[in-house]
Image (cartoon, rainbow, N blue to C red):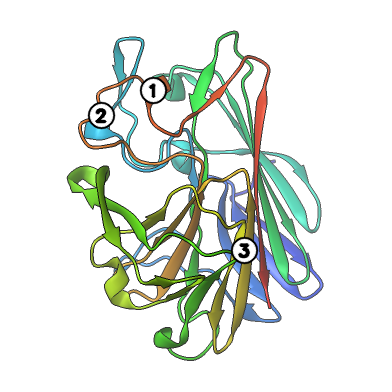
Amino acid sequence: MNREFIELQTDGARAVIATHGAEWRGWSVAGRELLWAPDRVHWDRTAPVLFPVCGWTRGGVARVAGETYPLSLHGFAKDQPFEVVEQGADHVTLRLTQTPATLALYPFPFALEVTYRLTGAGMEVVGLICNPGDAPMPYAFGLHPGFRWPLAAGDKADHRLVFDAPERPEVPEIAPGGLFSHRRRPVPVMGRDLLLVDTLFAREALCFLDVVSGGLSFEGSGGTLRMEWEGFPHLIVWSRPGAPFLCLESWTGHGDPEGFEGDLFDKPSMIILLPGAEGRHCVRYAFL
C-alpha cells in the first residue's frame, strides 16, 4: 500500500518523506526541527527532487531530435507519485518510472530511485538513475532541500557557510527566464568562508559551478549542519531576501545558457547514460 507520508525513526531522530515527488518533508534531531516547513508567503516546497533537468530550460521547453517538449523548471519528478519499493524503520526507497504523461515531456524510458536513510544525527539521500532503453538517455538530477535559517537558534546574521576548500568568489549572473549568463558576478567568499546575509540573494541564487569542495558546513550559534556530496559537480545556495530558510542544493546539471537552442543532448552539464547503465548520486547531512 502506497501511503501519502512515510515516517522514519531511529536514535532520537525522525524524518518524514512524502510519496508525492519523493520529497523530504521533515527532519528533527533530538527534538530540533531542521527542515523548512512550507508556507505560501516565502516558499511552498521543502526539498523537491529534480529530474530530468535542473534549473530552467529556455522558454520552458526542451528539444530532442527536432521535436519540442514542454520540460520546464527542474523537470517533472517533483510532481509525480512515487512507488515505495522497500522500507524499514530507518530507511525507504521510492521509485518513479516512465508513463505516457512523462514520455510527453521527456521521450525516454527511465527508472529513478531515491533512498533516504536516517541515522541518529544524519540523513543520507541517494539517487539512482537507470536507462532501461536501447538508446542513450540525457539527464540531470538534483536535490533541493531547504533548511531553517536560523538553523536551530540565534540570529540569521550569526550564520555562515564554510567550504571544505577555497572556492572561486564568483558565480554566473542569472538572466531573465532563469537562464545562465556568460557574465559573472562577485560573491564575498573569503577563502573557504561565506557569511550569510539576505542581500546575497537579491539577484537570484548563488550557483557555484564545478565546486572544488566535496562538502561544507552551515554554521550558526545553535549548531552546525554538515553536508557532503558525491557525484554532484554543482552547488546552489538560494533563499529569498527576508525569508527564514536557506536551500543548499546539489545539482549534476544546470539551467540553459542564454540563447541556447540546442538539443537536450547538447545542453551543458547533462549526463548521457548509455543503455543499461546507471548513475548514482549521494548527499549526506548531519546535524552537529
Residue 268 in the figure: left or right of residue 166? left
Q: Quadrant of residue 196?
A: bottom left
Question: Residue, x 57% and y 88% (percent of image)?
Answer: 222
Asked whether the beta carbons under mark 2 and mark 1 sit within 8 Å of each other, the answer is: no
Residue 105 in the image: above or below residue 170: above
What's the residue at 68%, 69% (across, down)? 286
On screen, residue 189 versus residue 136, left or right, reads: left
Q: Earlier in the sequence, mark 2 or mark 1?
A: 2
Q: Position of residue 273 (x, y in %)?
A: 58, 22
Within 10 angstroms of label 1, few (less than 14), some, or many (20 or more) residues? some
Q: Amino acid at mark 1?
A: Asp
Give the image location of residue 251, x and y in percent: 49, 46
Amino acid type at circle 3 is Met
Query: What residue is pinned by disc 2?
Result: 260
Q: Which callout, 3 or 1, points to the residue nearer the camera? A: 1
Mark 3 and mark 1 lie on one chain; the one further toward the N terminus is: 3
Q: Nearer the viewer, residue 202 or 190?
A: 190
Q: Amino acid at mark 2?
A: Phe
Q: Are marks 3 and 1 in contact (CB under 8 Å)?
A: no
Rendering quarter of residue 212: bottom right
Left or right of 151 in this view: 31: right
User: Is tag 3's residue or tag 2's residue first in the polypeptide sequence?
Assistant: 3
Badge 3 local density, few (<14 within 10 Å), some, or many (20+)? many
Kindly identify which numbered label has been placed on residue 227. Answer: 3
As helix, strand or loop, the secondary structure at mark 3 comes to strand
**x%, y% of residue 112?**
60, 33
Give the CA separation, mark 3 to mark 1. Answer: 30 Å
Could you say which disc has been placed on residue 266 in the image?
A: 1
> What whole-number distance in Å separates the C-alpha atoms at marks 2 and 1?
9 Å
Above-or-below relation of 220 to 69: below
